[in-house]
Each structure stands twice: as C-alpha cells, then as structure tokens.
Amino acid sequence: PQTIYLSDYTPFGWTVESVHLTFRLAPTATRVISKIRFTPTPNAPKQAFFLHGEALTPIRCTIDGQQITPTFTDTGLTCDVPDTAFDWEAEVEISPATNTALEGLYMSNGMYCTQCEAEGFRKITFYPDRPDVMATFTVRIEGAEPVLLSNGNPIAQGDGWAEWHDPWPKPAYLFALVAGDLINHPDRFTTQSGRDVELNIWVRPGDQDKCAFGMEALKKSMKWDEDVYGREYDLDIFNIVAVDDFNMGAMENKGLNVFNSSCVLASPDTSTDLNFERIEAIIAHEYFHNWTGNRITCRDWFQLCLKEGLTVYRDSQFTADMRSEPVKRISDVIQLRARQFREDNGPLAHPVRPESFVEINNFYTATVYEKGAELIGMLKTLVGDDAYYKALDLYFTRHDGDAATIEDWLKVFEDATGRDLTQFKRWYSQAGTPRLSVSEAFTDGTYTVTFRQDTPPTPGQDVKDPRVIPIAVGLLNPNGDEVLPTTILEMTEVEQSFTFEGLATRPVPSILRGFSAPVILHRDSTNEERAFLLAHDTDPFNKWEAGRALARDGLIRMIRNGDAPDTSYLDSLTAVVRDDTLDPAFRALALGLPSQDDLAQTLFDMGNTPDPQAIWQALETLKQATAQHMQDLLPRIYAQYQVDGEYAPDAAQSGARALANAALGLLTRLDGGAQAQKQYDAADNMTQQLAAFACLLSAGNGDAATADFYDQWKHDRLVIDKWFTMQIVQADPDQAAAITRTLTAHPDFSMKNPNRFRATLGALAMNPAGFHHASGAGYAVLADWLIQLDPLNPQTTARMCSSFETWKRYDPDRQALIATQLDRILAQPGLSRDTREMVDRIRK
Ligand code: HT7
Ligand code: ZN
C-alpha cells in the first residue's frame, strides 16, 4: 500500500464550478449520474486528469456530450481532456445494500445513508475526492422512500423525488444523502440577524420520543456560537438524522448532520446522565463544524486537526458554559490521559499534524482531536482571551470559503497579536508528551522554581526540540492562603527558572493549574503537601489532582511493596467527601481512582513490569478499605444526594446522582448489594438502574438483575448495548474472556452493527485484568473477532486494534501471546489496508 506524504501536496489542476447529481435508488443497483463543470486552474502544476473512484460499475462517461473510454484502475480513472473548460458526465452503478464497510452510500435498517469523510465519496461516483476541491452541489433523489434528504435547501419535490441545492461551496466529504421511512421532530430557530431556520431531527418510527433533548441541545449550540464566536447559521434548514449502523459518533455534513443513534437519541429511562452530557456535546460539536470545518475546511487530510482540534476545543467551552467548568476540565483531562497520553507513549504516537499516512481513517485519533484541542487552549492561554477572539474573527473573515492549513491558522494569530509562533508550531509537528520536572529553592524570601522539559523519542522522531509551555502557577502560604494568584509562566528553554520575591515563608506551589499544558509533571512532593493542596488549593483542577496523586502514590506502594492502604489519604478523601460546600460532581470525581491502565503505565515508567492482576487486586483492596473507612459517612451521603422530583439531566441533578452512586458503589462492598438491589428495583431512570446493575454485578450478585434487565430492555438496541458492556466490564478478570465469548454467541450479538461490536469486544479492553489475563484468552477472543470483522468493516476493525497498543509494557510471556495474535491478524489473506497499517505500526 502506498504511503501519502504531506510534503507531496500538489493542488488539483482543475476547478469544479458546479456538481449536479441524480440518484436513482435501488438496494443493489443504485444509479448515480454526475454532471460536473471543470475549468483548468491557471498556473496549476501540469498533471494527468485523474478522478477517484472505487467499487463503482461504470455505465458511461462523456465529455462535452461525447462518449469517451477512460482508463480505469482500482482507485479511479484517467482520460484525455480539453485544454479549456468542459462538461463531464458519468453514470455509475453501486450497491448500497451490500456495503458493510459503512462508507459511501449504504443501507442501515432499510434506510439509505452516506458517510463520505474522509474518502467515501469516491465510492459514490468518479470525482476529485480531496478536501481542497470545493463546489456547489445540486442533488436530485429518486426513490420510493417517503423522506429524501440532501445538503443545503430543498428546491423542489414530487411523488418519489426531491431536489436539493447547497449554495455553499463544499468538498465532497461533506456530501450527504438520506432516504427512508423517517419521522421528524421539528422546531425552529431565529438567528441573530433574523433568519428563520427550520430544524428537524429525523428518526426511525418508534424513536420519536427520544428527540426532545437533542433538539434543545441544538438550539443552545446555535445560540452559543452566535454569542461567543459571532457565528450564525447560513441555510434555511438544518437536519439531523439518527442512524443505527455508523462507524463513529456523528458527521457534520453541510445542513444534514448524520448521527450514530447512540449520540442523539435520549430519554431518562434509556439514557444515563453521562449519555445526556455526551449527546449535548456531540450535537454542539457537529453544529460548530458548520464554521470550523465546513465554511473553512482543510486543504488536505494532514490538516485534520485544523477543524477537529478547534471544534473539540469549542465544544469543551460550550459544555463548560452549560454545566461546570472545573468538572468539565477534570473529566477532559482524565480522558486525555487515558486515551491520548497512552497513544503518545506507544507505537501509534504521531504528531497532531502527521506527516504521512497509509489510510487516513486511522488518523482520527485522540492525538488529532484531544491533543489538537489542548493546543488551541494553550494558544488562548498564551495570547489571552481578547486576543484569542480577535484572532478568531480574523480567521473567519480571512479564510471563509477556503481550504486552509495550520500555517494559515498560526499566521492569523501572529497577525492579530504580533507574536512569533515559530516555536509554538513544534506542538503540531513533534509527537510525544513532554515530561516537565520541577526543582525548587527558597532563600531570603525568594522562591525559585526551575523547570526542565524532556520528550522521549517516538516512532520516527528521535530528537525533540524544546517547546513553549504555558505553566499556570499559584502559591499558597502554610496557612492555606493564596499569596500568588494564578500566573502564567512561559517556558521556552529546555531548562528555565522563575523567581518570586518578598515571601514571608516558603510557599506551597500549585503548579500546572487547570492543566495548562498537556505534559506529564514530575515533582518530588510529600504526601503531607498533597493533602494540604487537596484541602486548600483554590484551583479546582489542582485540588482534584492532589487527591489523584495521593491515591496513585498509595496504590503504587501497595503494588510494589505490599503496603497497606494509606490511612492519611483516606482521611483527606473523607474530608473532601464530607464537605457539603463542594460541588457533589467534584466530590464524585475525587472518589474516582486512577485506572488500571494509568497504574500500569506509571509502574512501567518507574522501571517495573506491570502485573495486571496485582494492579486490579490493589484497587479492590483500596476500594474495600475506603468503604470501611467511610462506613458512617456513606449512608448519609447516599441518602442526602437522592434527587426528588422530576428527572432532569442537568449538571445539578447529575452531580448529585454521581455522588450518590459513587457512595452506592462503596456501600455495596459493605452490604453485599442489599442497597443496590433496592435502588435497582425502585429505579425510574437509567442512571439509577445502570449504576445499581453495575454494583450487583461487581458484588457477584448480578444473575437475577442480568436476566431482568434483558427482559425489560430487549426491544431497545441502545440499552442492550449497555447490557452487553456492563457484564464484561464488571466481570471477574478470570471470567472476562469467557463471558465475552459467550456473549458473542448471544442471538442479539451482531458483527455488522459497530455499536454492538464495540459494546462487546471493546468492553473487554475496559476490563484490563481480564483482557491481559495470563492465559491469553482475552487476546485470543479479541483477535478472533477482529479477523472476522475485517472483511466486512475495515474501519472499525482497525480502530479496535488499538486495544493491543500497550503490549510492550508487559512481561515476555504476555508479549509473546500478543505477538502471536498480531501475527495471526497480519497473516490473514486479503487483510484490509486499514487493519494492516495499524497492526504493522503496533507490532514494530
Ligand atoms: N468529522 C467526522 C469524522 C469522521 C467520521 C464520522 C463518521 C464515520 C466515519 C468518519 N470518519 C471521520 C466526525 C467529527 O469529528 O465530527
Ligand atoms: Zn469533528
């Protein structure tokens, strides 16, 4: 397979003025007729005329009305074209019903839908399928389905047909078509300039009562983007469609967002508080793409972080504004460390802007998305809020309608602020997470803090240059008063000192407040100091971080030295949980422990080989000790934070439920599940029911609830996904692989539905002691199913290979077991390009 390089970028030699598409829908023989006006681009590099096209049956091709005979290959066609503007016309046949890859035009439960990002349009018709070719699209759909949708505004419709026109030039990856028997949940929005917009969420019959929350989220997003970024919606209609079979979360097609049904359908009895929050965030994310992605798109796929990093950053701001800023920040950092730091530390590490790829679908990663968003946050910290919004205004005016690059993005900031961002650009080109070590001195009232940055080598990048790192610091005196409020230190050297004078006593520093940069902080700190910060830090992130560091340190000592749980940690934690002045959601987060994966990486970084069983056991022991330590407090907290009245998925109620359910998890360790059973029986919302179900499973008491849950929800595919996942995540590690295998034989298991596949095989990796069981049974069951899925759906198969990405941390026996599975996957005849690239990179 061919490797594509950023350095090889060449503009397309023609401009596409307009595209007219006609679809004659039929499950296995859809006809697509394309009429495209091409004009040679003056001064473009000389090149052969090439149109992408894959898995298409050509029926006819004409230029200016004359039949031609192009040369067809597996990836497209070439032909001779006139030197002047010409009209291209082609008719092809495709088979949506047999398209299991869910890329291009496919069918899901009898409904036609498309997924064109990144390179799916070439499976619909011959086209220059690259993001820098932007054109206006007019689409005619002919089909028996009652609802026929495409991008832009509706222009005409009749019995069995509809026509749509999108006035905004767009790349082909933003094209969408949906046709099916759908019901809409309608609403309207008036934009700041008075434009009346029709809004619809389209769903399968039966799902119409799960749209109201998504619609409110959409209206809030539209208003927020006007208020905060001055961005207004630009069509007469905005449609969202829920689709059951979908490879990712959602897709921002212009005026016609397509959503994985799990990311839009919501109701209190079937969705948890976390589901509601996620749905609100994804609806916002896709909507925000209308400006950051659609109006300004990417020149090429190497620039993916230009739209994804910025849009993730914008959706985080939105969630912080709608809910709690500190809780959102802590939750984001937990995710960043779990997914992106893990990626950055292993064989799949790559820069936020990669320099090469084989299959672009493999680069929709935590690094591009989440680290990409962190870079935006750092830029904002460095230039300040006012300059940030000034630069964004300039970005929108200067680049509206463009296919832009990271250079364009940074230039806007340079022009708006007068800053030189040459060094900042290294964040885009250098992979790996910097380690930031700290040393301190205090003499005669002067406190000196010295930082050193080091980034370990990553694949293909041995040497790293120093980056600019914004370090937010505050200082506290021994009474717990803040003597220096949050101040940004700008580190640019490998090693750099900062001094603070006029201090009466040696301060306690609070470093990297708000997690001001995506780095790993190394500081020799005592547990007394951590407990002090947990009690007194005014920065909520660092307050939480101090508790996390205490927990991690205690767990590592339990694992390495066989120590008992640290009672001073338990005392400090109890004080936080008891403190009713603190947000319950924050206290629930404080009760969370470092994950098994986090501990494995910490041990590995300390020079130890992690033992997954020992890690799991230490966590169990600490949870048991916590329950005993808080045995008087837990019933009070559990009772106090029960929510009365009508269910609402807002921050206040969900924070209370999160704390009560965290208490329930600990109480279950004391009462064997008695309280959990009561909660399960009385639950009138999914947050309460699922939390109780998890407790019963973890107590080994879940058989009746497992049967009951299935019986109650067997008609609801999204709830049954939870049923699959929970049984595997909560399984005893010795049983996890066997339970996974048994569940893959359940009649409701399906390989063709990515949600169900992830709910089952993806869940196994969420039980690390089970997945990494010394028998190798976890590795074998995952590999067996990846091998079966690959011929049907390479994209989802390839993404799920990342469960193996940490394999080099483990002992030689486990490494050998994993290597056997990776080699078995690689030996499959006809293995997809997607999966081969991922397994090759992991195996190296
Ligand atoms: N821009 C989209 C990314 C995407 C995708 C979505 C669904 C299926 C396949 C996909 N490939 C890429 C989603 C987003 O980031 O908003
Ligand atoms: Zn996105």
Image (cartoon, rainbow, N blue to C red):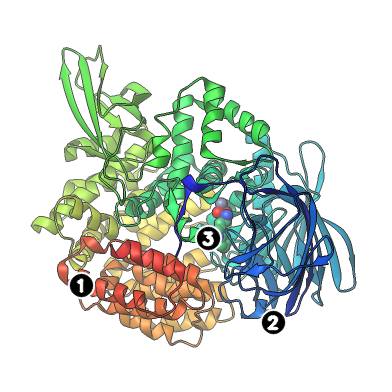
User: Which numbered dot is residue 816?
Assistant: 1
Ligand 1 picture quarter: bottom right
Q: Which residue is mark 3?
A: 275
Q: Is residue 217 left or right of residue 442?
A: right
User: Which numbered dot is residue 36?
Assistant: none
Tell me how far mark 3 sits from mark 2, CA to CA: 36 Å
What x and y, as percent, mark residue 490? Answer: 36, 25
Which comes before the other along the chain, label 1 or label 2? 2
What x and y, as percent, mark residue 195? Answer: 82, 42
Q: Is residue 592 left or right of residue 308?
A: left
Q: Which residue is mark 2?
A: 28
Q: Quadrant of residue 837?
A: bottom left
Kindly identify the residue that appears in the image at 48 percent across and 61 percent down: 359
Residue 751 or 659: which is nearer the viewer? Answer: 751
Tell me how far mark 1 sits from mark 2, CA to CA: 44 Å
What x and y, as percent, mark residue 85? Answer: 79, 50
Which comes before the other along the chain, label 3 or label 2? 2
Q: Amino acid at mark 1?
A: Ala
Q: Amino acid at mark 3?
A: Asn
Q: Under tag 2, what secondary structure?
A: loop
Please tell me whether mark 3 or mark 1 is closer to you in this view.
Answer: 1
Q: Badge 1 local density, few (<14 within 10 Å), some, or many (20+)?
A: some
